[in-house]
Amino acid sequence: MINIYSYKISREEAKQLKIKDELKRINNPIINKEYEEFKEGWNNIYIYLKKMKEKYLLKYDCFEVMEPIIICDNDPIAKILNDDGELFYGMYIAATYQLFISWQNTFLSSIKFSKNSIKNINEIYIQDAINQNIIHFSFYKNFNEIIYLFSKRNCFNNDWNINYNKYYSIEYNFDLIEEELGKILLGNIKYFKTNQKFIIYNYETFYGDNSNIIYHFIQKYNKISLKYNFFQKETNINFLFTLQFLLNYLKNENYKSDLSINKIIYENSKFISIEDKYKIFFESNKNFKLINFISIYEYIEFLCYPILIENVDISYKLKIDEEEKNKINEYFKNNNVILISKELLKSIRKFISRFLTGKRINRNIKDDENILYYLKEKEDLWSKIIFNDIKFEDEFNLMIKSFSIKINQSIELYQYLNQLLKQ
């Protein structure tokens, strides 16, 4: 389901759409069957966690403990989309996965495998696991029952009289225990990766492993600018989300920089699911190559800024006090900041567009930290020629000493500098 909805809906939209309505709209028998199996399994989990609540807490990372719930057809689709960005909703699944990962990995780690068997037990995402990858004690209640079955009391003499000196002695048949464990474990059992696959909602692409996705993309494929006259008709925000989807797909590939984007989409249609109108767009512009991708992305991002800023949480729209504004005025009035001022507004806009949009609670940044530290370190927010200039660090260090603006004041900083630097 996360593949179906990633880059397609926002967090707020996911809370409005009901599971039953979405299943009807998708109209896929396989998905319907999988959902019914999921619901049955989830109800079993609910019963187990309610019974064992003193021992196992439903808690994801540093978030607060959640009470187990039953998932119903009338619930929002957000409840079945694995998520780490907000308490409740999809975090119920994330917390449950976290328990399963801990249980299986802890059990496997407690067993000393031979060198021949350990090489087959590699890591996979828990969402990719099939039945054979998971430990099943099908005929046993627990590990102790296996030990009990293949062990015997060793307190009898040859005449079968009890030897009380050996009353608590137990003789273990390690060969049979190992053989039985081998049947359970060494078929195709896997360790689970500690991280999971999560839904990527609209406006929330640049989080976690994706926070440096543009930087790594530029390092891999470079960046060559294009002329943009023909882009005016493509200001739709959904085109930006489509480009983010492509960016996420391409980050793990190793194509040549001069390969056509259209060719990549066409040859990987099984994995790249985008709207026909965007396929037609790239078909009509076959000269667009990977080296042009970030240039295309940044321009569409610029055109969509008015929409993006509407989806920035109000907590990032705090005011800057007059004293700090005076410091900003003095700095730009008295210092030679020609280098940074060329792209400062643009870099702030990119920062806002990528890291402050969306409604997720769990982010990579701290609201009360100085935004200037982030701008200085994020190479992908600047052109290469500016970032690599020897004056860049000196100018930035002077600016950091001169005034301080918190991340939750980013919107007003952009608006204020937009007026100040254009005077």
Image (cartoon, helix red, strand yellow):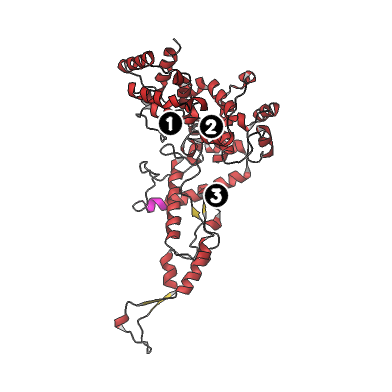
Q: Quadrant of the C terminus?
A: top left
Element carrying mark 1 = helix
Q: Pointers 2 and 3 in contact (CB under 8 A)?
A: no
In this picture, residue 208 sits left or right of residue 155:
right
Q: Quadrant of residue 290?
A: top right
Q: Quadrant of the N terminus?
A: top right
Q: In this figure, which residue is indicated by the disc labeled 3?
A: 128
User: Label 2 vs label 3: CA separation?
Assistant: 23 Å
Is residue 52 in the magenta section?
yes
Compared with 238, 254 (above or below) is: below
Check residue 9 in the rendering and tell me which mark sits there, or answer none: 2
Looking at the image, which residue is at 42% across and 18% down? 337
Q: Amino acid at mark 3?
A: Asp
Is residue 417 in the magenta section?
no
User: Label 3 vs label 1: CA separation?
Assistant: 35 Å
Closer to the camera, 93 or 336?
Answer: 336
Residue farthest to the front, as pictured: 390
Question: In the rendered structure, which segment of residues is drawn in magenta?
Answer: 48-53
Check residue 377 in the rendering and tell me which mark sits there, or answer none: 1
